[in-house]
Image: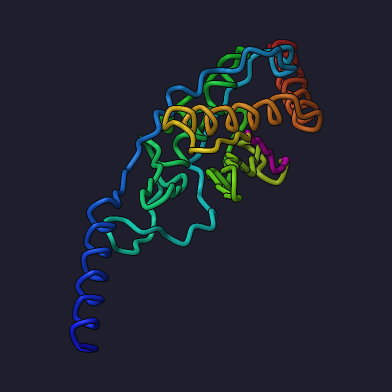
Amino acid sequence: MIKRYEQKYSIILALTFLVFGLIACHYQIIVDTNQASELKIGSPLKGIGPLTFFIEPFTSARHITGVFTKGKFQENGPNYIGYDAIGYNTKTYLADKPITQVVETAIGKELQRNGHVLIDSTKQKEADVIISGVVYKYDINTNATSTTNHYSAEVSVRIIASLRNNPDSSISKIFNGSKADQSAWGLKNETLGIMTNEALRNMLADFTNDPELIEFLKKVKCNNEKKEESIKFNK
């Protein structure tokens, strides 16, 4: 009798795991970073006058451990944004391009939006200012309670602006942006994409309005004007 009970229990247990295994799904969500439209706010960068910038490839120092993908624990690549689990369903969020490129592109667009010139590596020697940096955060974080799932998107980037002809003359600061939301049943895929893009825009707002950065770039512009006047005078 006991053996029959154990056999029935084992069968039920096995069927339970099988059902949950069939129900559980893993989704890979690609976030469209092109949604990260340009800032609409005014910026002191616009009043400096045109400077020429070259953006070096950014590096990544994000602390990412990995995620379960199709039943296997895997480390995340350069496109990884975050991970979410609702019941037995899991989602991995990936950007449509490496995160460092997303940040580089956003900074370049912000400089161009304010009247500055962006050049590629073939004309690097013509740059007034070299921009480089490190991405510390570009993540979606989840915190579930008994009734609500809390979501936050965070972007944190160190941006370094230095003179091309004098690398020792530079400014280095960390700029941050975030966006939070919550839901009882999890957010829609497009909502999480909107959140990360909003966090990126908030980081750009921190960057484009920074008084120390503005003062540094004003000095660069002033020195350029003095050099131009000296050249004209010597002619």
Is residue 136 visible in this depiction of the protein?
A: no
> Would residue 56 be found to the left or right of residue 42 on screen?
left
Considering only vertical position in the picture, is 203 above or below 81?
Answer: above
Q: Position of residue 145 (x, y in %)?
A: 61, 50
Range covered by the magenta-colored residues:
171-179
Residue located 73% across and 15% down the image: 48
Nearest the camera: 39 or 46?
A: 39
Q: Position of residue 103 (x, y in %)?
A: 52, 35
Residue located 24% across and 69% down the image: 12
Q: Position of residue 60 (x, y in %)?
A: 51, 51
> Would residue 187 be found to the left or right of residue 10 on screen?
right
Find the residue positioned furthest to the front.
Answer: 1
User: For the C terminus, which image quadrant?
Assistant: top right
Is residue 143 visible in this depiction of the protein?
A: yes
User: For the N terminus, which image quadrant?
Assistant: bottom left
Picture quarter containing residue 213?
top right
